[in-house]
Image (tube, rainbow, N blue to C red):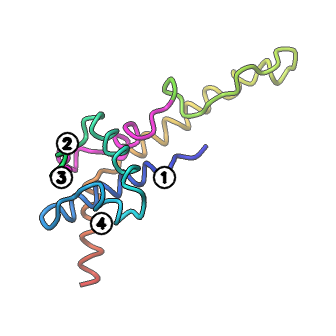
Amino acid sequence: MQISSRFTIALHIFTCVDVFKDEYKVTSDFLAGSINTNPVVIRKILTQLRNAGLITVARGTGGVTPTRPLSDITFYDVYQAIEPVENGDLFHFHEAPNPECPVGRNIHGLLDGKLKAIQGAMEDEMKKYTIEDLREGIQELLEEKA
């Protein structure tokens, strides 16, 4: 299991939008330059964030705007927008363990609750961090360099 780079790209997007909002038109091309990826990747992620109601995007003229205060957008919100999990389950269980095998017959009962608890702990931890935390962190880093 690995969360794709789209999640961290989305967090990068939010940080760029905040840092550069008063200086530049923050377009998919601009964001692609900061992230060092193809603008098509950025546009797909922006679409996911927009569909989740986390941003608005001004087409043509450029511009990305969060729809809520940054302190109200958690890493979990971004994760849900970017990495939707199948049937709400982070862990995909193999489809047909052998019912004739004592392990195969019992593996779901053995693992299902544990995997749900692991997923819940990860999601709870993601809810503790917000885009505001990123804004504050980048400001501190930029001030240190100045």
Residue closest to the far left: 22
Residue closest to the far bottom: 146
Q: Amino acid at mark 2?
A: Thr
Q: What residue would you read off at disc 1? A: 5
Q: What residue would you read off at disc 2? A: 56
Q: What residue would you read off at disc 3? A: 63
Q: Residues within 10 Å of mark 4 (few under 14, many from 20)?
A: few
Q: CA distance from mark 1 to mark 3?
A: 23 Å
Q: Which mark's residue is nearer the viewer, 1 or 3?
A: 3
Q: CA distance from mark 2 to mark 1?
A: 22 Å
Give the mark nearest the N terminus, 4 or 1: 1
Q: Are marks 4 and 3 in contact (CB under 8 Å)?
A: no
Give the mark nearest the N terminus, 1 or 3: 1
Nearer to us in this view, 103 or 77: 77
Task: Examine the rendered structure and indicate whether residue 88 appears above or below residue 33.
Answer: above
Nearer to us in this view, 47 or 132: 47
Looking at the image, which residue is at 22% across and 58% down?
26
